[in-house]
Image (cartoon, rainbow, N blue to C red):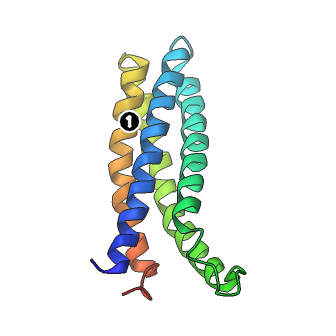
């Protein structure tokens, strides 16, 4: 398998695992806040979602890529690291804007039509995650994050 495809698989694995962790904690938070107004529940749940997702993703991404940016001298290849970080942040950023809008509005909608809070959170999260994954993968491809790997 080509190295760039392995990199895509690692990236998607990290995104997927981070979403699994975030979806569980978001559903718990939504249920704990089920007595709150829909907009408050949706907002706090989204904060927990983002905090959990980025903490998990950052840790997993670091673990998978810590050796990638090491030079033979043992120092970090900061110029390549900066270039790749800009590309991945750009790709994730566009996805996050779309994710944020769809996640909050879907959860708010499901809560307003009397879905259980945890179920509203799960459905909104899963739907938004699918959209996010498509946007991020297209963004990574457009940004040519793994273009130098063959």
Residue at 54%, 68% (x, y): give it: 65
Relative height, residue 143 to residue 28 (above, below):
below
Mark 1, other Cα within 10 Å: few <14 / some 14–19 / many ≥20: many
Q: Quadrant of residue 66?
A: bottom right
Q: Position of residue 9 (x, y in %)?
A: 35, 64
Is 7 or 35 nearer to us in this picture? 7
Q: Position of residue 25 (x, y in %)?
A: 51, 30
Is 19 or 118 nearer to us in this picture? 19
Relative height, residue 124 to residue 113 (above, below):
below
Identity of the residue furthest to the top in this view: 35
For the N terminus, give its image quadrant. Answer: bottom left
Q: Position of residue 64 (x, y in %)?
A: 51, 63
Is 129 or 98 nearer to us in this picture? 129
Q: Position of residue 148 (x, y in %)?
A: 44, 89
Q: Which residue has dot 1 on it?
A: 124
Q: Is residue 103 left or right of residue 67?
A: left
């Amino acid at each position: 398998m080509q190295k760039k495809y392995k990199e895509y698989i690692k990236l998607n694995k990290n995104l997927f695992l981070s979403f699994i962790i975030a979806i569980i904690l978001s559903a718990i938070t939504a249920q704990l806040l089920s007595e709150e107004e829909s907009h408050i529940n949706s907002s706090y749940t989204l904060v927990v979602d983002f905090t959990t997702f980025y903490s998990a993703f950052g840790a997993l991404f670091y673990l998978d890529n810590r050796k990638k940016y090491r030079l033979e001298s043992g120092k970090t290849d900061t110029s390549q690291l900066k270039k790749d970080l800009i590309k991945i942040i750009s790709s994730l950023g566009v996805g996050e804007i779309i994710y944020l809008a769809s996640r909050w509005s879907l959860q708010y909608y499901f809560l307003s039509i009397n879905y259980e809070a945890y179920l509203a959170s799960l459905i909104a999260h899963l739907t938004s995650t699918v959209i996010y994954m498509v946007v991020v993968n297209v963004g990574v491809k457009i940004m040519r994050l793994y273009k130098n790997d063959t």
